[in-house]
Amino acid sequence: MSIALRPLHGEFGAEVTGVDAAAPLDAATAVALRAAFARHRLLVLRGQHLPPAAHIAFSRHFGELEVHVLDEYHKAEYPEIFELSNLGPDGRPNAVHPDRGTLFWHSDASWQAAPALATLLYAEAVPRAGGHTLFADMIGAYEALGAAERARYATLRVVHDLHVSRLKAGYPGMTAAQRQARPPVEQPLVRMHVPSGRRALYLGSHGQAVLGLAELEGRGLIERIMCHATEPRFVHEHAWRPGDLVLWDNTATMHRATEYDTAVEPRVVRRTVIRGAPVVPG
């Protein structure tokens, strides 16, 4: 295969053509895709037909796959697949959002000691209106900071907790077994994007408190940084089509979904997540 790239938001994001993700990849194409991913941090492949087994096979070109701790979202025959669907048993929209936590800015699995490296999300059915995904460039956001802010943030650490972020989204929270498997973790506020050697802000809705700061001061700082990082100059909006496959680098991006009419519009997406490593401070 021979790939071509079309930039989406400056250097942040690129649309890829010339790749059939369901077909076996030759070594040169796999290397080219990984290089494009390292550079752009966000890749979009449109017009794909990607059954779950092929989705898993393609994902493995980017690393080892994880199985999410929230097992209620797994596809039984493919535990690596995390499916979000608002379709009921009758195949019609059921007016229930499958995961309201996705409506908040976040980085996938930042609540793990070794957070997710990458996510690959495939769209089977999409709404006619809404249900987009916004992506924030956390390298661009860091590099736009003033020198004083960079110096202040360099040593700060943030507590990330999936249980608390689930409660914020209106869910009962995690079970005792899930809490034991994924307790709160500390992450640096500034991390290194290893492929490029550039620094990125590392935050999101899972970030609950700043170590060494009073609760209100820490929350205020988190909110200010989140507002900065999600300014339009750092954000790319992806409007989904059926057959889209989108890959993003969780070490250098945040993302969130937008609302849609869950009672009328179907939305079925499934994802795989690439296992990461402990965060390298920036």
Image (cartoon, grey):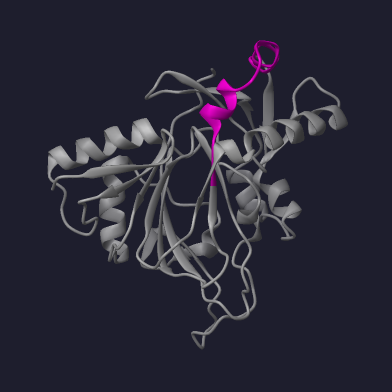
Taking the magenta stretch, the answer to whether it contains residue 281 is: no
**Position of 255 relative to 41 (above/below):** below
Q: Residue at 75% of width from left, 36% of height from top? A: 223
In the image, taking residue 188 as reference, residue 127 lies left or right, namely: left
Q: Main secondary structure of the magenta part?
A: helix
Q: Position of residue 45 (x, y in %)?
A: 32, 53
- Image point (63%, 34%), residue name: 229
Magenta includes 147? yes
Residue 75: image x %, image y %?
42, 66
In this orientation, which residue lies closer to the viewer: 174 or 100? Answer: 100
Q: Quadrant of residue 221?
A: top right
Give the residues in magenta: 135-154
Is residue 66 among what the camera can see?
yes
Q: Residue at x 28, y 36 (%)?
A: 34
The quadrant the C terminus occupies is top right
Most extreme residue toward the bottom is: 90
- For residue 261, what is the image quadrant? bottom right
Is residue 111 in view from this perspective? no
The image shows residue 87, relative to residue 79, as above or below, that is below
Residue 226, how many percent across, how many down?
69, 36
Q: Exactly how many numbered labels are in the figure?
A: 0
* Image side of residue 175 versus residue 199, left or right: right
Q: Looking at the image, is 153 positioned above or below residue 69?
A: above
Identify the image quadrant of residue 122: bottom left
Q: Is residue 61 left or right of residue 170?
A: left
Query: Left or right of 136: which side holds 77?
Result: left
State the image coordinates of residue 70 (x, y, percent, origin top left): 56, 56
Instruction: Looking at the picture, tell me which residue is in the foreground, 113 or 83.
Output: 83
Name the one closer to the observer, 13 or 31. 13
